[in-house]
Image (tube, rainbow, N blue to C red):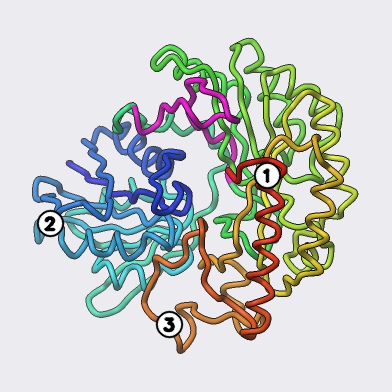
C-alpha cells in the first residue's frame, strides 16, 4: 500500500513569519517508521502557504497531521486543493485533532480521525483501508454513513523503546540537521525525543498527555549513535515537553550517552532538578537547560497552576550555573491578571539572577487551543476562541511569536499590559541582548 503523510511547517515553533527552522515533525516521522516496518510504502509532504495543489492520486491512503491549531487553516486548504483518488482512505490526526477530533473529522472530510498515540492505531486503520469499516479499533472517531462513531480510548504504549527510530530519511537532511540551534553554538545538531507527556497541570500548556513515558538509556544511545554515523552530528537538543521529571530515568540516559562526546540541551521545570543530577548531566555533555520560569510573580504562577516559587527559581538557576551548565529561562507575559506590578516582580527576579542566566526568551501569552485557559475562556475573561460567539474563523492567530492580539481584559487593562510588556522587553534586551 502507498501512504502519503502531510505535515505543516510548524509556525508556532518555527518563528511565525520568520521561517526559523526548529525541530522536525516527530509525529509523522514515527508514523512513517512503523508504516515502513509493516511493509507499506511511505512518502511525506511538507505543507506551506506556498504549497500548490498536491497530486496525491498515486496513494491508497492519505493522512493529514495537524501539528498545531495555528496551521489548521493551512492544512485544511491543502486538503481542499489536493487531488486524491475517490477510493483512497483519508485520515486526520495530530495535536489539534487530539483536542477536537469531531470537527477535524468533519472539516477534513476524512474517513477516520486518530487521537492520542497513533503508532499502533494507524496500522489498524490501514488494515481496514479497503473496507473502511473501523468497528473495534480503539483511539479513533470514524464516519459510518451520516453518523460519527468513536472507539474506546487506546491505552498508552507500555514501552516506547519498542518503536522504531523516527524515519528521518523521509525528509531532506537540511530539515533535521541544523548548525545554528544548539545553545548559541554552530555545532552540527539534531533534535530528539526521549520521553512523552508531562504530568504537570499548567493552564497555558497544550500537553497532549499527562502520563510521562521514558525511553531507556540504551534506546537513546542507539539513536544518537545512528545520528553520528549517518549524519555526523556533534550535538542534540531534547525537545520533550519536560525531560527532567523522573531523575533515575534521566540519569540512565546520561550514563549511556556520556561516552559519545556530544553536547546537548533539554527543557525542565525549576522544581525537578538537584545538584547531583545537574552534575551528572554536565558530565554527560549537557551545556544548557531551558527552564519554564514563566513569571516572577507567585500570584501569576499560582493562577497558571505552575505552582512554583521564586526561591525554587533562584535555586535551580544558581545550581545550574554552578554545575557549569548554561541556564536559559522562558517568560510568558500577559497571562490574565498580568499588570505593571506583576511585570515588575518578573523584572526584579531576573535582575537578581543576573549573570547566572545565560539567555532569556520572552513570549507574549496566547490562549492555545486545547489548554485549560482556552477551554475555560469565560472564567479567564478571554475572547476570540472558536468556542465563543465572536469566533472569526482565523486559526492562524494562535501562533506564539510576536503575537500582539488583545486576548482578555478591558481596554485599560490591555493598555497596561502593552506598556508593561514593552518595559519587560526593553529590560531583557538591554541585559541579554536577545530574546531567542
Q: Which quadrant is home to the N terminus?
A: top left
Disc 2 from disc 3: Cα separation:
31 Å
Q: State whether residue 239 is above or below residue 10.
A: above
In terms of sequence position, does the residue under pointer 2 or pointer 1 come before the other? 2
Residue 383 horizontal side relative to residue 93, left or right: right
The answer to whether residue 268 shows anywhere in this view is no
In terms of sequence position, does the residue under pointer 2 or pointer 3 come before the other? 2
Q: Secondary structure at mark 3?
A: loop
Give x and y (percent) for residue 20: 42, 42
Q: Give the labeled residue for mark 1.
A: 360
Q: Secondary structure at mark 2?
A: loop
Q: What label sits on residue 433 in the rendered view?
A: none
The answer to whether residue 160 shows anywhere in this view is yes
| Magenta-colored stretch includes residue 272 | no
Q: Where are the magenta residues, as a range? A: 174-196
Q: Give the labeled residue for mark 3.
A: 391
Q: Residue at x 15, y 49 (%)?
A: 60
Tell which tag, 2 or 1, sits nearer the viewer. 1
Amino acid at each position: 500500500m502507498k501512504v502519503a503523510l502531510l505535515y505543516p511547517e510548524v509556525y508556532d515553533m518555527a518563528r511565525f513569519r520568520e521561517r526559523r527552522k526548529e525541530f522536525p515533525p516527530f509525529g509523522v516521522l514515527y508514523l512513517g517508521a512503523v508504516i515502513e516496518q509493516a511493509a507499506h510504502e511511505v512518502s511525506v509532504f511538507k505543507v506551506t502557504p506556498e504549497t500548490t495543489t498536491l497530486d496525491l492520486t498515486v496513494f491508497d491512503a492519505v493522512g493529514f497531521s495537524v501539528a498545531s491549531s495555528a496551521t489548521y487553516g493551512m492544512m485544511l486548504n491543502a486538503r481542499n486543493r489536493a487531488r486524491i483518488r475517490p477510493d483512497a482512505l483519508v485520515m486526520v490526526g495530530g495535536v489539534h485533532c487530539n483536542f477536537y477530533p469531531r470537527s477535524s473529522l468533519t472539516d477534513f472530510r476524512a474517513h477516520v480521525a486518530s487521537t492520542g498515540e497513533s503508532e499502533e492505531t494507524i496500522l489498524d486503520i490501514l488494515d481496514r483501508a479497503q473496507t473502511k469499516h473501523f468497528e473495534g479499533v480503539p483511539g479513533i472517531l470514524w464516519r459510518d454513513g451520516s453518523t460519527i462513531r468513536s472507539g474506546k480510548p487506546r491505552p498508552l504504549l507500555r514501552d516506547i523503546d519498542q518503536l522504531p527510530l523516527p524515519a528521518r530519511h523521509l525528509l531532506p537532511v537540511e530539515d533535521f540537521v541544523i548548525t545554528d540551534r544548539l545553545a548559541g553554538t554552530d555545532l552540527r545538531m539534531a533534535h530528539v525525543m526521549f520521553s512523552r507527556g508531562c504530568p504537570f497541570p499548567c493552564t497555558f500548556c497544550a500537553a497532549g498527555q499527562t502520563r510521562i513515558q521514558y525511553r531507556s538509556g540504551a534506546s537513546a544511545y542507539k539513536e544518537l549513535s545512528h545520528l553520528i554515523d549517518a549524519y555526523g552530528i556533534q550535538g542534540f537538543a531534547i525537545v520533550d515537553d519536560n525531560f527532567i521529571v523522573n531523575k533515575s530515568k534521566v540519569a540512565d540516559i546520561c550514563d549511556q550517552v556520556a561516552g559519545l562526546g556530544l553536547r546537548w540541551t533539554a527543557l525542565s521545570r525549576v522544581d525537578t532538578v538537584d545538584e547531583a543530577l545537574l552534575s551528572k548531566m554536565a558530565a554527560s555533555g549537557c551545556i544548557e537547560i531551558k527552564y519554564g520560569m514563566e513569571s516572577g510573580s507567585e500570584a501569576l504562577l499560582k493562577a497558571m497552576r505552575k505552582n512554583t516559587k521564586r526561591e525554587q527559581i533562584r535555586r535551580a538557576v544558581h545550581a545550574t550555573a554552578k554545575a557549569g551548565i548554561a541556564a536559559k529561562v522562558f517568560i510568558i507575559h500577559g497571562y490574565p491578571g498580568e499588570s505593571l506590578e506583576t511585570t515588575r516582580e518578573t523584572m526584579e527576579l531576573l535582575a537578581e539572577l543576573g549573570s547566572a542566566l545565560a539567555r532569556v526568551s520572552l513570549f507574549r501569552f496566547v490562549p492555545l487551543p486545547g489548554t485549560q485557559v482556552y477551554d475555560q475562556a469565560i472564567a479567564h475573561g478571554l475572547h476570540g476562541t472558536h468556542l465563543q460567539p465572536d469566533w472569526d474563523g482565523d486559526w492562524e492567530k494562535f501562533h506564539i511569536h510576536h503575537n500582539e492580539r488583545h486576548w482578555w481584559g478591558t481596554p485599560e487593562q490591555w493598555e497596561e499590559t502593552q506598556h508593561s510588556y514593552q518595559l519587560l522587553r526593553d529590560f531583557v534586551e538591554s541585559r541579554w541582548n536577545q530574546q531567542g
